[in-house]
Image: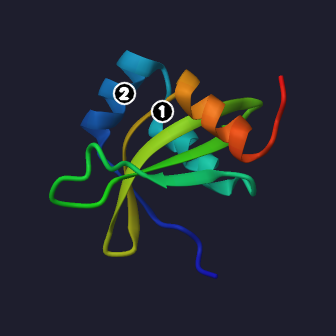
Amino acid sequence: MKAARFELDEDKDRENQAKHGVPFRLAQQAFLDARRVVLEDVSHSVGEARHYCIGQVRGAILTVRFTYRRDVIRIFGTGYWRRGKRIYEEQNKIHR
């Protein structure tokens, strides 16, 4: 299995850090979670398929919005969102 390659837009990264407090470099770690959940983002998939990766990073559940472009993962948004946490817990049968 090849290691994932990421493409990061520095302007979007700065915007995301200002809005959600999470750098894209940290978001890459969500893809390393063996229990991560990957879902298609059907409401925003216009022109290209978009996805969510929901994974645990540093003890919290992080949601990453991304797309694939030529075998490269392009992150365009990330944050600690309640809905992502709920989906992750449901998929992994975590009861709180």
Left or right, residue 20 beside residue 50: right
The front one of 51 and 32 is 51
| Residue located 63% across and 47% down the image | 29
State the count of labels. 2
Mark 2 lies on residue: 16
Q: Is residue 43 above or below residue 4?
A: above
| Residue located 63% across and 30% down the image | 85
Residue 44 rendering spot, x and y as whole percentages: 26, 44
- CB within 8 Å, label 2 to label 1: yes
| Residue located 33% across and 54% down the image | 50
The front one of 66 and 93 is 93
Mark 1 lies on residue: 23
Left or right, residue 3 beside residue 65: right
User: Of the residues shown, which amino acid type is indicated by label 2?
Assistant: Asn
Confirm whether residue 80 shows in the render. Answer: no
For the residue carrying disc 1, how many other residues have a C-alpha within 10 Å: few (<14), some (14-19), or many (20+)?
Answer: some
> In the rendered view of the protein, which quadrant contains the C terminus?
top right
Q: Is residue 24 above or below residue 82?
A: below
Q: Is residue 38 above or below residue 63?
A: below
Residue 66 rendering spot, x and y as whole percentages: 39, 50
Q: CA distance from mark 2 to mark 1?
A: 7 Å
What residue occupies the far right of the structure in this picture? 95
The first of marks 2 and 1 along the sequence is 2
Q: Is residue 49 above or below residue 61?
A: below
